[in-house]
Image (tube, rainbow, N blue to C red):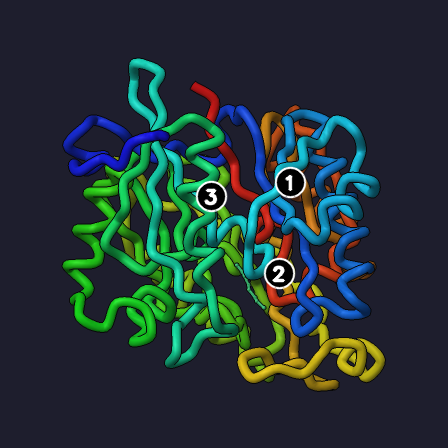
Amino acid sequence: MTQRLNSTPKQDGYRMPAEHEPHAAVWMAWPERCDNWRNGAKPAQKTFVEVARAIAKTTPVTMAVNAEQYDNARSRLPEEIQVVEMSTNDSWMRDIGPSYVVDDAGHRHGVDWHFNAWGGLMDGLYFPWDKDDQVARKMCEITGDETYRAPLVLEGGSIHVDGDGTLYTTEECLLHPSRNPDLSKEEIERQLCDHLSVEKVVWLPRGLYNDETNGHVDNIMHVVKPGEVVLTWCDDPADPQYEISREAFDALSSVTDARGRAIKVHKIPMPGPLFINEEEALSIDCSEGMEREAGERLAASYANYLITNGQIVLPLLDERFDAEVAEIMKRLYPGYDVSGVDAREILLGGGNIHCITQQVPRV
Ligand code: KQY
């Protein structure tokens, strides 16, 4: 058994590396719940296979799978993908997996946050979430890493770090009353600094419009490198995203990062706006937490991409913008391969490629 640590990463000299630093592996979790994924989750499973295949070009992939789906997942996934049986409630590995931290001597630990399905009984998307809450610890048992159980409700998609002292997040999510209602903004900042060894938190007011995660930062922006980010942009003043993106731009432009750098913002176009159609809505089981009605606006963003070992795994969401965004990625990440995956099926579940993946840093 790997140990639970009673200290904090900061006390032990561990920091969370940025996503553009080297990865030992990327983990995912197999989709199956029919009140989130349409048509018995078969189209989503096909897309998850495509994402895993793309990542595996540069990085080993492990897929966590519930026991009942083991045979199905094993036979649909390429041989080089490792499949491990692990109980989950759904399949958002970014949010249920650990945030790994490393030290300069080549050691790694996992930070195991409390998970409450994006809002618990107040605003959560499903109940129960107990199996999801155990995933971070189980993963660390397998990757051989000791864990800190952080006293904070937090999903991995609600934070980005630059690996050089700065963390990006949104007030909409981290200050939402369904997460840590007894903690002040300063206390939340303190927990982030103690558990990820960041020195500065940059707060965006809101995340993407109509995002059921209460505005995860990974669905509106991504960190390119320290001092540089991409931000989802919308040019239509009639669209609710117009004002949200401008607020975010102003927030990013009015502060410096932990090292005193001005933050350079690269605007990337917003796909759509995209909406769930009637056929799609009808093929998802009804449940209490998740709203899947025809005509509902989807929280679609190209910023929800994964960076892994010289590769960008980019969601393809709208033919009018896919090629343009792929070109922007090639310019921002010189020498990287850009692998596009048709990602509408992930979007219908409420997130995208970044949300369904979690990197294990290489040490
Ligand atoms: O990180 C995410 N975007 C997860 C979204 C969860 C949606 C559940 N239906």
The answer to whether the residues at label 2 and label 1 have Cβ atoms under 8 Å apart is no
Answer with left or right where residue 257 lies relative to residue 352: left
Q: Which mark is residue 301?
A: 2
**Residue 100 location, quadrant:** top left
**What amino acid is labelled 1 in the image?**
Met
Residue 322 visible in the current orientation: no
Image quadrant occupied by the C terminus = top left
Residue 228 percent location from the top left of the image: 44, 41
The one of 347 and 220 positioned closer to us in this rendering: 347
Dot 1 lies on which element? strand
Classify 179 as above or below 189: below
The answer to whether the residues at label 3 and label 2 have Cβ atoms under 8 Å apart is no
Q: Earlier in the sequence, mark 3 or mark 2?
A: 3
Q: How many numbered marks, from 0 up?
A: 3
Q: Can you tell which of label 2 and label 1 is closer to the viewer? A: 1
Whether the residue carrying mark 1 lies under 8 Å from ligand 1 is answered with no
Circle 2: is it few (<14), some (14-19), or many (20+) Cα within 10 Å?
many
Circle 3: is it few (<14), some (14-19), or many (20+) Cα within 10 Å?
many
The residue pinned by badge 3 equals 223
The residue pinned by badge 1 equals 63
Whole-number angstrom distance, CA of label 1 to CA of label 3: 25 Å
The answer to whether the residues at label 1 and label 3 have Cβ atoms under 8 Å apart is no
Classify 41 as above or below 3: below
Whole-number angstrom distance, CA of label 3 to CA of label 2: 14 Å
